[in-house]
Amino acid sequence: MAKRKAKRKTAKKKTAKRKAKRKVAKKKTAKRKAKRKVAKKKAKRKAKRKVAKKKAKRKAKRKVAKKKAKRKAKRKAKRKVAKKKAKRKAKRKAKRKVAKKKAKRKAKRKVAKKKAKRKAKRKVAKKKAKRRTRRR
């Protein structure tokens, strides 16, 4: 009887030890689980940050691209205006050139007319002189 009691006592001790071990093991696994949970959360946050950074970068790029496009458009518009101005200037120049030519021709014609008039006058004077000499 005493032997059996002693055996039971040792068995109980062993089960108690096993229980305690299991308790410790459970605690450890729980700790590991908690750590993993924390790590996962951290990783998630990190990933979110990464995504946000990428988004921000893209946004910034778009902003820069927009600015560039605006500048380009402005330059194009300026060039267009300058082209128009140059065209107008060229037209004016051409007109002036034509007008100058016209004026030159007019002046030449005037001179020619004067010359012809003088020639005609001379001719008349000569005829008159001839007549006069004939009468005498």
Image (spheres, grey):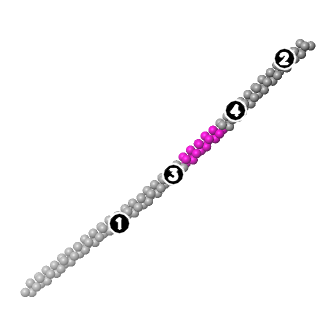
Look at mark 3 in the image and give the residue it sits on: 67
Q: Earlier in the sequence, mark 1 or mark 2?
A: 2
Q: Is residue 82 above or below residue 113?
A: above
Looking at the image, is mark 4 or mark 2 earlier in the sequence?
2
Magenta span contains residue 56: yes
- For the residue carrying disc 4, how many other residues have a C-alpha within 10 Å: few (<14), some (14-19), or many (20+)? few
The tag earlier along the polypeptide, 1 or 3, is 3
Q: Is residue 110 above or below residue 134?
A: above
* Residue to which mark 4 is pinned: 35
- Say what amino acid the circle numbered 1 marks: Lys
Separation of residues labelled 4 and 1 (CA atoms): 89 Å
Spatial CA distance of label 1 from label 2 is 126 Å
Amino acid tagged 4: Lys
Q: Which residue is mark 2?
A: 10
Instruction: Tell me the quarter of the image containing the C terminus.
Output: bottom left
Which picture quadrant has residue 11? top right
